[in-house]
C-alpha cells in the first residue's frame, strides 16, 4: 500500500508521468500490431535496429528531427502566449521558398551566402507569423483560422514559385538547388571520421541544423523565463485579462510573439534547405507536415522549449523507425501514424493516471 | 453530546472523514441538524465547512462516515440522489446560465414536458409563481440572468431548489453580496421556510448575521466540530473566540495620526461611462478624494462601480468628463500611464484580474512593478532581486506558508492570495489605492489584517477608494461615505454624520419599494 502511495505521488510529477504515458502508448500500439498479426518481439527488434544499429541511422534521426524540433519550439512559444500556432506549416513553406530564392539569386562568399539564406528564410516565416498576429490583435481574427488559410496560401505560392521559369529545373518537379556556397552540411568538418567505424555518418546529410535547434531552444527558454518580455508573454498566456489590467500591451505582444514564432519556423525551413539534399523546393501535392508535427512535439514536451529537443528527437525516431519497420516487416505505413497518435493521446491524458491509481488504492482499502 | 439517530433530525452526519490528497479536511466530524431550525455552520476559510456541505449535497464523496436523513441512513453518491432526498443547495458562486431567462434557469434539469418532449412552460410558470409568492421571493421570470442583480440571482437559486421540492436548504455564504435590506429579506424567507418544519443550513463566517438569523450554530475548525451552541445564549465575542481559537478584538483602530486631510489626489468631474452593452453605467458622476482619506463607495453590485473603477484605471473608455490624479488628467490614456501616475488597484476578482494563478508567488509579487529597473534591467529579469523582494513581502505580511516565493500562487489559500495583491500594490507606493471588495471571502483574522493595513496606509497619507457591497465594511473603514445608485452618487456622508438605515435605503434606490434591481 505504501508503495502505491509513492507511485501515485511520482506519477503526479511531470517527467515520470510523461515516461509512463509514452511507455503505455508504446505497449498499446505494439498490442495493436500484435493483434494485426505481427510478432511484438520482431516489431521492437526492428524498431531498435532501425534506429540504433548503425551510426548512420542515428545521424539520420537527428537530421529528420531538426526541423520538427524547431517548429515544435515555435508552437511551444505561441502556446505560452495562449496562441495555437497551427500556421507553423505555412511559415515553414514560406521560409523554404524564400531560402531557395535567396540561395539562387545571391552569389556571395560561403559564410555570407549562408547568412543571407538563413536570414531570408527566417524573415519570410516571420512575416507570415506576424500577419497572423496582426490579424488577431487588430481585428480579433482567430489565429487558427488565419493560420490554416495561410498554410494553403503558402502551399500554392510554393507551387507557383517552382513553376516559374527562372527557378524551375527542367524535366522535374523541383526548383533549382541553391548555390553550393549556401550549403550548411558538415561533411568536411567530420571528414576525420573517414577511417573510423563511424565513417558511414558521412553518407548522411549531416549539417549544422541540430546545433541551431539546441541554441534556439535555450534562447527561447531564456526569453520566456528570464526576460521582461517573456514575463509579459506568459502573463498573457495564463490570464490575458489580468495582464491587461497590469498595464501589459497585449496587442503588441501577440504580434511580436507571432513574429518570433514565424521566424523560428522559417529558420527551420532554411536550415533544411541549406543542410539537406536536394537543397530545393518541390511541387507540393499536400503538406509535408514539418510544421504540423511541431504541434505534437510541443504537446509531448508540455510546451517547454528545452523539452522540444527531446520530444523532437523522439518523434524523429518514430518517423524514421517507422520507415525501417515498413521495409523490414512490410507493416503498412499507417501503423507508425497510429502509434504516434496513441502516444500523443496517452501523453495528453497523462494527468488522469495518478487519480485512477488513487481510486484503485481507495477501493482496495475499503474491501480490506 | 451526540444525539441518538432519530427522525427528529433532518440531517445527522456521523464520523465524516475527508482528505484531499494527503491533507485531511474533515476529521471524524459529527453534526445534528434539527428539523424546522435554522442551523449556522461557522468557521474560518479552509476550516472545511463548504466541503462538509458539498458532501451532504453529493458533490464530493466522504472517505468514510454515515449520513442520516430523517433518521434513515442514506448513501449520497451524487447530487442527483441529494436532490431526490429533498436537499437543495445555493452555492456561493451561483450556478446559473447567464443568457438564459430566470424561468429557463429554474426549470433546467427538471423540465415539465408535454408530449414529444415539448416544454410545458405555462405549467412551470404557474408552479414557480406559487412558490415565489409564498416565500416572497420576488423575481422577474422573463429577465435574463446577465441583466439582473446579484440579489435576484440568489433568489433564483433559492427558487430553483424549492421548485425541486427541497426540504433541506443549504446556503453557502448567502449574504456575501447582498445589501442590508436584501439580507433582512433573505432571513425572513429562511424563517418562513423553517416555520413549515423545513430546515435551513447556512454556511458563513459572518458573526453578526448569525445572531439575527439562526437558532443553532455549529463551529468548525480544522475539520473538527468544536462546539454546537444555542445562539440566543451566546455572545458574538464568544463565537469569534471559539471560531478562531484565540481571543481578539473585533474593532479596528480608527484613530488618525493627522487631523486634516491633505491635498486632493483623485478628482472626478461629470464622468460618464458606458458599459459593454453601450448603456450609460456611470452618469455625470463627480467626487474627490484627498490624501489621508478613505472614501467608501457604498452600493449594490451592478450600479456602475465596476465601470467607474475600470474607467479610472483606463481599462475602458470614458465617454465624457474628467479624471485627474494630483491635477493631471488621465482619462482615456492607458493602463500603463495610470500606473505610472501612482494609481494602484486591488481588484474584486483576485483570481481573474489580480493574480496569475499559474505564476509563482515571486512572479506575482512584481506584477504591477516589473517595469522598475530593480526588477528588469535592459529587458532581463533580475531573479535575485525579485525573490528577495517577494520574501520580504511574505515575511512582512505574514503570508503562509512561510518562504513560499517559489510556490505556484494557485496553491495558496484565498486570504493569502489577497495578501499578496495588497502587499504588492502597497509596495508600489501609490498615491491612490483603489480597493474593491478587499475582504471578500476572507476569514475574520485575514479580513481584520487587511482592514488594519488599509488604516495604516491611510494614516501614512494615501488616498484610498474603497468599493464594497458590504455596508458594514464601508462604515467601519471610511472617512467619507458616498452612496452610488444607478451610476450616480446619491449622497455623501462624513464619518460622524450618517445613519446606517438611511444609507441602506439610498443603496436600494432612494426608498423606492418597487424592484430596483431591474433598472440597476
Image: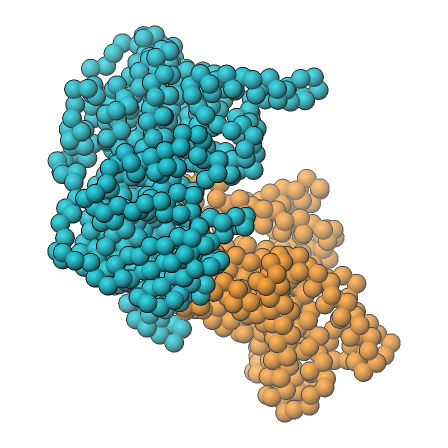
Chain colours: A orange, B cyan
**Residue A113, percent from left and from top:** 63, 87
Q: Is residue B487 above or below residue B107?
A: below
**Residue A184, percent from left and from top:** 62, 80
Name which quarter of the figure residue A60 lies in: bottom right
Q: Answer with left or right where residue A242 lies relative to residue B7.
A: right
Q: Answer with left or right where residue A248 lies relative to residue B502.
A: right
Name which quarter of the figure residue A204 lies in: bottom right
Residue at the spot 72% in from the left edge and 51% down from the top edge: A334
Residue at the spot 75% in from the left edge and 71% down from the top edge: A158
Q: Answer with left or right where residue B137 lies relative to residue A36.
A: left
Q: Quadrant of the C terminus of chain B?
A: top left
Instruction: Give B279 or A341, whichever is nearer the viewer.
Output: B279
Q: Quadrant of the N terminus of chain B?
A: top left
Name which quarter of the figure residue A136 lies in: bottom right
Residue at the spot 34% in from the left edge and 12% down from the top edge: B195
**Residue A47, percent from left and from top:** 62, 55
Amino acid at each position: 500500500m505504501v508503495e502505491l502511495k509513492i507511485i501515485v505521488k511520482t506519477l503526479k510529477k511531470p517527467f515520470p508521468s510523461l515516461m509512463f504515458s509514452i511507455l503505455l502508448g508504446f505497449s498499446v500500439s505494439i498490442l495493436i500490431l500484435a493483434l494485426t498479426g505481427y510478432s511484438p518481439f520482431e516489431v521492437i527488434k526492428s524498431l531498435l535496429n532501425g534506429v540504433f544499429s548503425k551510426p548512420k541511422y542515428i545521424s539520420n534521426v537527428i537530421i529528420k528531427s531538426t526541423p520538427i524540433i524547431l517548429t515544435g519550439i515555435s508552437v511551444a512559444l505561441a502556446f505560452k502566449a495562449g496562441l495555437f500556432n497551427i500556421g507553423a506549416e505555412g511559415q515553414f513553406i514560406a521560409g523554404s521558398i524564400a531560402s531557395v530564392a535567396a540561395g539562387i539569386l545571391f552569389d556571395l562568399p560561403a559564410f555570407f551566402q549562408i547568412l543571407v539564406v538563413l536570414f531570408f528564410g527566417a524573415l519570410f516565416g516571420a512575416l507570415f507569423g506576424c500577419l497572423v498576429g496582426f490579424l488577431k490583435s487588430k481585428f480579433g481574427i482567430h489565429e487558427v483560422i488565419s493560420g490554416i488559410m495561410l498554410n494553403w496560401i503558402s502551399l500554392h505560392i510554393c507551387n507557383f514559385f517552382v513553376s516559374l521559369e527562372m527557378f524551375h529545373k527542367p524535366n522535374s518537379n523541383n526548383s533549382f538547388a541553391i548555390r553550393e556556397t549556401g550549403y550548411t552540411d558538415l561533411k568536411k568538418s567530420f571528414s576525420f571520421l573517414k577511417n573510423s567505424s563511424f565513417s558511414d555518418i558521412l553518407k548522411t546529410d549531416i549539417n549544422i541544423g541540430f546545433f541551431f535547434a539546441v541554441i534556439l531552444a535555450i534562447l527561447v527558454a531564456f526569453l520566456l523565463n528570464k526576460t521582461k518580455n517573456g514575463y509579459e508573454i506568459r502573463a498573457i498566456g495564463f490570464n490575458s485579462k489580468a495582464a491587461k489590467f497590469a498595464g501589459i500591451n497585449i496587442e503588441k505582444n501577440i504580434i511580436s510573439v507571432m513574429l518570433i514564432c514565424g521566424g523560428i519556423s522559417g529558420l527551420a525551413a532554411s536550415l533544411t534547405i541549406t543542410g539537406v539534399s536536394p537543397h530545393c523546393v518541390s511541387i507540393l501535392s499536400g503538406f509535408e507536415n514539418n510544421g504540423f508535427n511541431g504541434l505534437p512535439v510541443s504537446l509531448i514536451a508540455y510546451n517547454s522549449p528545452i523539452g522540444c529537443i527531446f520530444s523532437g528527437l523522439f518523434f524523429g525516431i518514430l518517423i524514421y523507425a517507422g520507415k525501417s519497420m515498413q521495409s523490414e516487416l512490410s507493416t503498412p505505413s499507417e501503423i507508425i501514424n497510429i502509434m504516434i497518435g496513441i502516444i500523443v493521446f496517452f501523453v495528453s491524458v497523462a494527468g488522469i493516471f495518478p487519480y485512477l491509481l488513487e481510486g484503485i488504492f481507495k477501493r482496495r482499502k475499503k474491501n480490506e | 453530546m451526540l444525539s441518538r439517530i432519530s427522525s427528529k433530525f433532518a440531517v445527522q452526519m456521523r464520523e465524516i472523514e475527508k482528505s484531499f490528497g494527503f491533507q485531511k479536511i474533515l476529521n471524524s466530524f459529527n453534526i445534528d441538524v434539527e428539523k424546522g431550525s435554522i442551523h449556522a455552520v461557522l468557521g474560518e476559510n479552509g476550516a472545511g465547512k463548504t466541503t462538509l456541505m458539498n458532501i451532504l449535497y453529493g458533490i464530493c464523496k466522504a472517505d468514510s462516515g454515515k449520513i442520516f436523513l430523517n433518521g434513515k441512513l442514506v448513501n449520497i453518491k451524487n447530487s442527483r440522489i441529494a436532490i431526490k432526498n429533498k436537499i437543495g443547495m445555493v452555492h456561493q458562486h451561483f450556478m446559473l446560465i447567464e443568457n438564459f431567462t430566470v424561468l429557463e434557469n429554474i426549470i433546467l434539469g427538471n423540465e415539465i414536458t408535454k408530449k414529444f418532449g415539448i416544454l410545458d412552460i405555462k405549467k412551470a410558470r404557474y408552479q414557480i409563481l406559487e412558490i415565489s409568492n409564498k416565500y416572497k421571493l420576488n423575481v422577474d421570470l422573463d429577465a435574463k440572468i446577465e441583466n439582473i442583480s446579484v440579489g435576484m440571482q440568489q433568489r433564483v437559486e433559492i427558487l430553483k431548489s424549492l421548485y425541486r421540492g427541497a426540504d433541506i436548504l443549504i446556503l453557502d455564504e448567502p449574504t456575501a453580496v447582498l445589501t442590508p435590506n436584501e439580507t433582512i429579506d433573505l432571513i425572513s424567507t429562511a424563517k418562513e421556510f423553517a416555520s413549515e418544519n423545513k430546515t435551513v443550513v447556512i454556511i458563513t463566517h459572518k458573526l453578526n448575521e448569525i445572531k439575527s438569523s439562526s437558532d443553532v450554530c455549529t463551529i468548525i475548525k480544522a475539520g473538527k466540530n468544536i462546539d454546537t451552541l444555542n445562539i440566543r445564549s451566546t455572545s458574538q465575542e464568544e463565537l469569534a473566540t471559539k471560531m478562531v481559537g484565540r481571543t481578539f478584538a473585533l474593532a479596528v483602530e480608527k484613530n488618525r495620526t493627522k487631523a486634516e486631510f491633505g491635498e486632493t489626489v483623485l478628482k472626478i468631474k461629470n464622468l460618464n461611462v458606458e458599459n459593454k452593452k453601450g448603456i450609460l453605467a456611470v452618469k455625470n458622476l463627480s467626487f474627490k478624494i484627498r490624501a489621508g482619506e478613505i472614501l467608501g463607495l457604498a452600493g449594490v453590485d451592478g450600479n456602475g462601480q465596476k465601470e467607474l473603477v475600470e474607467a479610472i484605471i483606463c481599462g475602458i473608455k470614458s465617454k465624457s468628463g474628467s479624471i485627474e490624479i494630483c491635477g493631471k488628467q488621465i482619462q482615456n490614456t492607458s493602463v500603463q500611464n495610470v500606473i505610472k501616475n501612482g494609481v494602484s488597484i486591488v481588484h474584486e476578482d483576485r483570481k481573474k484580474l489580480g493574480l496569475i494563478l499559474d505564476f509563482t508567488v515571486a512572479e506575482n509579487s512584481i506584477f504591477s512593478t516589473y517595469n522598475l529597473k530593480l526588477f528588469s534591467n535592459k529587458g532581463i529579469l533580475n531573479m535575485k532581486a525579485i525573490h528577495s523582494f517577494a520574501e520580504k513581502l511574505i515575511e512582512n505580511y505574514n503570508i503562509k506558508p512561510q518562504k513560499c516565493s517559489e510556490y505556484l500562487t494557485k496553491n495558496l489559500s484565498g486570504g493569502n492570495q489577497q495578501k499578496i495583491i495588497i502587499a504588492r500594490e502597497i509596495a508600489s507606493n501609490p498615491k491612490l489605492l483603489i480597493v474593491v471588495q478587499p475582504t471578500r471571502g476572507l476569514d475574520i483574522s485575514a479580513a481584520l489584517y487587511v482592514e488594519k493595513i488599509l488604516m495604516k496606509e491611510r494614516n501614512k497619507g494615501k488616498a484610498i477608494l474603497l468599493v464594497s457591497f458590504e455596508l458594514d465594511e464601508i462604515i467601519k473603514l471610511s472617512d467619507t461615505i458616498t452612496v452610488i445608485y444607478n451610476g450616480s452618487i446619491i449622497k455623501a456622508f462624513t464619518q460622524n454624520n450618517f445613519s446606517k438605515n438611511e444609507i441602506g435605503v439610498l443603496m436600494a434606490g432612494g426608498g423606492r419599494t418597487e424592484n430596483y434591481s431591474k433598472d440597476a
